[in-house]
Image (tube, rainbow, N blue to C red):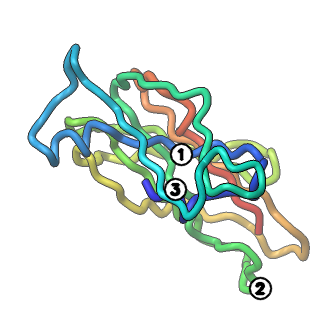
């Protein structure tokens, strides 16, 4: 996770996306244990305690939890924002991630436009620790002039962490 690339306006609050520690641990040949430790580092030109614009970060409300069957919506990829080529048959494409260490099958996924009715479909399977793009079979009618809010949700039974199950984009 790159703090500098994800920084916010100084003095303001920003919620970060989840950091999947299991992948980092596996890459370093270790696992969660009773002695598991997390270390945050920060580098800057000034001391973090400098009241005149110091280059520091404040961490607050840190949660560490183990998640089961974690399916995630990473993003709504298509249509992209500020798009002029919307039609009566616009494809809806999302990126979904299986954050679990096993293959997950029969994954319910849905989308809706401007708070309307959901279009429900099922992704056959997603391999462990893998991100895929899924294009809904049912297209959306976005031919009328105006802006649209597209909300997509993955709702896998047994997913113990719902905070990363929704993505929204405005076009």
65 or 148: which is nearer to us?
65
22 or 30: which is nearer to us?
30
- Please state if 109 lies on the left or on the right of 128 as rendered: right
CB-based contact (under 8 Å), mark 3 and mark 1: no
Q: Which mark is residue 84?
A: 2
Q: Which mark is residue 17?
A: 1
Figure check: 62 above or below 3? above
Circle nearer the N terminus (2, 3): 3
Across and down, in percent, residue 60 comes to 61, 31
The residue under the point 36% across, 37% down is 39
14 or 108: which is nearer to us?
14
Q: How far apart are marks 1 and 2 (CA)?
A: 30 Å
- Please state if 10 lies on the left or on the right of 134 as rendered: right
CB-based contact (under 8 Å), mark 2 and mark 3: no
Q: How crowded is mark 1: few (under 14 residues within 10 Å), some or many (20 or more)?
A: few
Q: Which of marks 2 and 3 is in front?
A: 3
Across and down, in percent, residue 17 comes to 53, 45
Residue at the far bottom in the pictured view? 85
| Residue at numbered disc 3 | 3
Across and down, in percent, residue 54 comes to 67, 55
């Amino acid at each position: 996770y790159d703090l500098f690339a994800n920084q916010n306006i100084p003095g303001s609050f920003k919620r970060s996306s989840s950091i999947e520690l299991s992948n980092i641990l596996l890459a370093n040949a270790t696992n969660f244990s009773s002695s598991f430790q997390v270390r945050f580092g920060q580098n800057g030109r000034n001391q973090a305690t400098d009241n005149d614009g110091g280059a520091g970060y404040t961490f607050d409300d840190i949660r560490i939890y183990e998640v089961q069957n974690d399916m995630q919506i990473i993003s709504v990829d298509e249509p992209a924002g500020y798009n002029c080529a919307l039609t009566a048959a616009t494809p809806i494409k999302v990126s979904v991630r299986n954050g679990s260490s096993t293959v997950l099958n029969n994954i319910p996924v849905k989308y809706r436009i401007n708070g309307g009715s959901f279009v429900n479909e099922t992704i056959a399977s997603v391999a462990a620790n893998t991100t895929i793009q899924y294009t809904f079979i049912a297209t959306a009618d976005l031919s009328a002039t105006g802006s649209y809010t597209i909300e997509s949700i993955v709702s896998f039974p047994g997913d113990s962490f719902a905070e990363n199950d929704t993505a929204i984009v405005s076009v």
